[in-house]
Amino acid sequence: MAGGEKKKSGGGGKKKEVKKETGLGLSFTKDENFGEWYSEVVVNGEMIEYYDISGCYILRPWAMSIWENMQTFFDAEIKKMKVKNCYFPLFVSPGVLQKEKDHIEGFAPEVAWVTKSGESDLEVPIAIRPTSETVMYPYYSKWIRGHRDLPLKLNQWCNVVRWEFSNPTPFIRSREFLWQEGHTAFATKEEADTEVLQILELYRRIYEEFLAIPVTKGRKSELEKFAGGLYTTSVEAFIPNTGRGIQGATSHCLGQNFAKMFEINFENEKGEKSMVWQNSWAYSTRTIGVMVMVHGDNKGLVLPPKVAALQVIVIPVPYKDADTQGIFDACAATVATLSDDGIRAEADLRENYSPGWKYSNWEMKGVPLRIEIGPRDLANNQVRAVRRDNGEKTDISRVFLVEQVKGMLDKIQQNLFDVAKQKRDACIEVVKTWDEFVKALGQKKLILAPWCDEEEVEKDVKTRTRGEMGAAKSLCTPFEQPELPEGYCISRRKEYEVKAKYRILYVLYNSLLSQRKYYAGTKCFASGKPAKKWTYWGRSY
Ligand code: 86X
C-alpha cells in the first residue's frame, strides 16, 4: 500500500463483523478506537487517499466538493463586503520572510525551503509560504498612499505549507493545506474592529449552518493569540470523543504592528501621515476534518446536506421477475425531478452490485438521504426514503417528491446540528476550583472556569497539567459571558461567619475588613485571585 504513515490496522480496537460480510465496513468503532476509526473513515469514505510523503494527503472529489460548497458561500459573502480576490506567489525570498523576525522566530522550524533546481544548488534558497503576511505587506506599503486607497481588502484562496512534526492527521494537521487568507487595511481601528466580528460571524455560519457543528465565538488569551497581532478572535469547536477543543477559524485584528514593520502609511484627510490598521483572517480544510469527527459514525461518514456533493442517492431494488426496466426508469425519472429543483441527486444503476452492497457503500460515503425504488414502490407510485443520520424510513408519494425530499434534507441538517449541540453541551463542565478542574479534565470535559486573566497563571495551568495527553490551555473567552459576581463587599452571612471565626481576634478582623482582604466575588479557579472573566479550558488539537 502506498502512504508513508498509514497506520497498520489490527492493534487496538476490535474488528467488526460487518467487514467480513460485505468487505465494506469499518474495522474500528468511533468509541473504541477513535484515531483508527478516523483514518479509516476518511479513506473508505473516499475523501482522502494517503500519499507517500508523511503529512500530505490527496483530497479526492468527495472532499473537494465539500470545500467548494463552503467556498461558494464564503466567497459570495466577502464579495458583498467588497473584499477582492487576488493571488500572490507561493515562494518567499529569505529577506522578505525574515523581515519581521519576531513573529517568524517561533515558527522558523516549520518553514519548508527549496534549495535546488535540478542538480544545481540555488544561489539563494527560496521559502514556501506558511502564511502570506511577509509576501503581501510590502505591496500594501507600495499600493497605499492616501486615504482614498483605503480600505484595501484582499483575499486569496490558496495552499500553504507548514512542516509540522507532531502527529499528522488528514485535514486536522497536514503539512500542506488549502485555506482562504484575508488581509485588510483600514484608516481607523473602528473599521478594523467591525470587520473582525463580521468575518467571525461568517465563520460561525460556515460551522453552524453548513457543517452543522456548534461553535463558540470568543477571544483568545494573550498566550494563545497570534503574537504578531493586537487581538485574536476565533470560533471554537469541540470533539466529544477525544475531549479536545479545536480552533475552527480565526479572525485577527493586527493593530498597527505590521504597518510599523512594513511601513504601511497613508496621508489622512488632514494631510497628516498615519499608519493603517490591519486585520487578517482564515479558515482551512481543517473544517472538513472537524465535520467528519463530529458527525461520522460506525457506518462511515455522515454529511450535512448543505455541503454534501450528493444529497440523495437513488437505488433500484429489482426483484426476480418484477419490471426491472420500469424500476430503472423510475429511478432515472426521480433523479431528473430532484435535479430540476436544484437537489443534488444521482442514481446508482450499476448492475454488478447488490442493493445491500450499495446501501453500505453510500452509507460509508455519508449521503444524507437514500431513496429505494422496488416493485411495490413502483406499483404504488411511491419511493422509500431512508435518512443517513437516524435510519428513519418514510414512504413518499412521487406526487410530492420534491417538497418532501426538501423537507427531509432540512430536517437532517437541523437534526445533525441539534444532536451535535446536545453532545457538546453535555460535555461542558462549569468548575470553580482547581480540584474540580483537574477532575473535569480527566473526564474529557470542555471546562468553563472563572479566570483572573493573567498570563503567568495560564502558563502555570499548562505546567501543572503536563502529561502524555498534552497540557490543558485556554480555548477562548466567550463573548457571551455568564454572570460573574465581583467585588470586595462582604455579604452579611459571610460577615457573620468571619466574625464568629475571628471572635478572639476582633481587632485583626476589623483591620482585615478595612483592608478589604475578603474578596467576596468569584475567584480564579487556578490562582484564587479575583476572577475577571469566564473562559473555556481543555486539551486541544
Ligand atoms: C500565524 C496568522 C494569520 C493570515 C492567520 O491566522 C490568518 C491568515 N495569517 C498565522 N502563523 C504564522 O504566522 C506562521 C508563520 C510561519 Cl513562518 C510559519 F512557519 C508558521 C506559521 N503558522 C501560523
Image (cartoon, helix red, strand yellow):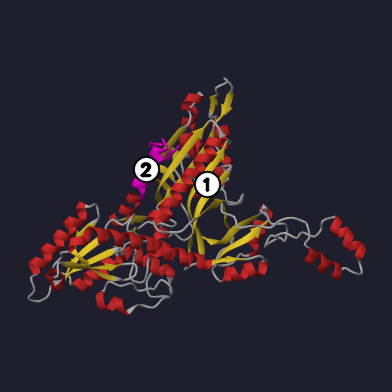
Is residue 291 located in the magenta-colored stretch of the structure? no
- Amino acid at pointer 1: Ala
Residue at 72% across / 59% down in the picture? 521
> In the image, residue 25 lies at what x, y percent?
30, 72
Whether residue 244 appears in this view of the structure is yes
Task: Point out which mark residue 75 bears.
Answer: 2
Residue 55 placement: quadrant = bottom left
**First of labels 2, 1 by sequence position:** 2
Residue 265 placement: quadrant = top right
- The residue closer to the viewer here, 126 or 438, is 438
Is residue 73 located in the magenta-colored stretch of the structure? yes
Q: Is mark 1 within 8 Å of ligand 1?
A: yes
> In the image, residue 45 lies at what x, y percent?
31, 64
- The residue closer to the viewer here, 160 or 336, is 336
Residue at 31% across / 71% down in the picture? 391
Q: Does 176 appear above or below 317? A: above
Q: Distance between the residues labelled 2 and 1?
A: 31 Å
Task: Point out which mark residue 535 bears.
Answer: none
Which residue is tagged 1? Answer: 108
Q: Does 34 appear above or below 216? A: below
Q: Does 184 appear above or below 239? A: above
SS under mark 1: helix
Q: Is residue 328 left or right of residue 410?
A: left
> In the image, residue 306 lies at what x, y percent?
33, 55
> In the image, residue 11 lies at what x, y percent?
41, 75
- The residue closer to the viewer here, 528 or 282, is 528
Q: Does 179 appear above or below 356? A: above
Magenta range: 70-93
- Amino acid at pointer 2: Asp
Q: Is mark 2 within 8 Å of ligand 1?
A: no
The crowd level at tag 2 (other Cα within 10 Å; few <14, some 14-19, many 20+) is: some
